[in-house]
Image (cartoon, rainbow, N blue to C red):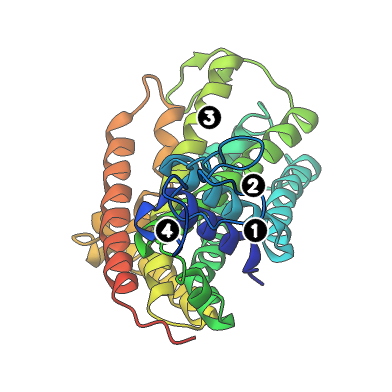
Amino acid sequence: MSTVSGKEAVFTENAVHASPDHAPSPAAGSAPGSAPGSVPGPAMAAGGHAAGGPIPARRAVSAPRAWLRLLGSEIGMTFRRPRNLAMLAVLTVIPVLIGIALRMFAGTGGGGGPAIFEQITGNGLFLTFAALSLLVQLLLPVSVAVVAGDSIAGEAGIGTLRYLLVAPAGRTRLLAVKYAGVVVFCLAAVTAVALSALLTGLVLFPAGPITLLSGGTIPFLDGLLRIGVVVLYVTAGMAALAAVALAMSTLTEVSVGAIAATVVVVIVAQVLGAVPQLSAIQPYLLTEWWNGFDGVLRDPVATGDMGQGLLVFAAYAAVFCSIAWARFTGKDITA
């Protein structure tokens, strides 16, 4: 459940320190030399000065600093919610289960699986790529949909959104902070999966130079660098989905509705992507590019597909963030 006090305090401080248009006017009867907006008291001397000297003006808070403080409050609230922590824990455990299963049953079954899974028993680093290729299909999108779908609708549903908008910080800034907070969660979720899979792979399987799917071999440290590239790529894909969920969240005051709508969009896109007769529209589906990071497992890196995927992610983020902004800035908040 969202709390009001933390973000209200940030908005109120922004309004007091960073908004000169809302500064109080000089009180009636104040001394000519008094500071604007000050109220004379017993310690005020005739010239508008306190007995110990001039009253120092309150230090203004810069807009970037105020934005970062608000973002920090949003991120802290996101990672304090037990629901979000539970989802991160589940995402972290699944790569461990995959590694244990492969370790126990390696060589007992037939082949025919994806090439990336066949490489895991020879090099534990491949477990990271395999875990991300599995979780990006459903569990990662569901986790992102829960956090992003609840960002606006959840606040409206429990009545805290109205209080956040009382302070003159602006709806655009609030929406940007909400989206930035979800993107940070996306990065944390993908990183948790990658680190869990990497550690599990190094413990259960051999590690060393990596033989790529294209047949070349790269050093171990280069493999770690490519894992970092994959983490950023998958995070970009989840950030694009977060924009979709954010737009859904501005259309309703029931967070469950926004979450369910986002999950339905993901499932429908995956179904459409599996129908060969719909190949004409498949390049425009968001889900079609989530596994485009397999280009890092080739030498040289196949940047063409990854670059096109990043363009699709950017297009989705721009379109649905614009929809969210248009809806949220003109929305009548009644709850």
List the residue tagged with mark 2.
Answer: 110
Question: What residue type is disc 3 on?
Answer: Gly
Residue 136 location (% of width, % of height): 52, 53
> Disc 3 and disc 2: Cα gap in Å?
32 Å
In this picture, is 43 found above or below 197?
Answer: below
The quadrant of the rendering that contains the N terminus is: bottom right
List the residue tagged with mark 3.
Answer: 228
Question: What residue type is disc 1 on?
Answer: Met
List the residue tagged with mark 1.
Answer: 77
**Crowdedness of circle 1 by 10 Å Cα count: few (<14), some, many (20+)?**
some
At horizontal 68% and vertical 54% (from top left) the residue drawn is 88
- Sequence-first disc among 4 and 1: 4
Residue 71 location (% of width, % of height): 53, 50
- Sequence-first disc among 3 and 1: 1
Contact flag, marks 4 and 1 (Cβ < 8 Å): no
In this picture, is 247 found above or below 193?
Answer: below
**Crowdedness of circle 2 by 10 Å Cα count: few (<14), some, many (20+)?**
few
> Disc 3 and disc 1: Cα gap in Å?
27 Å
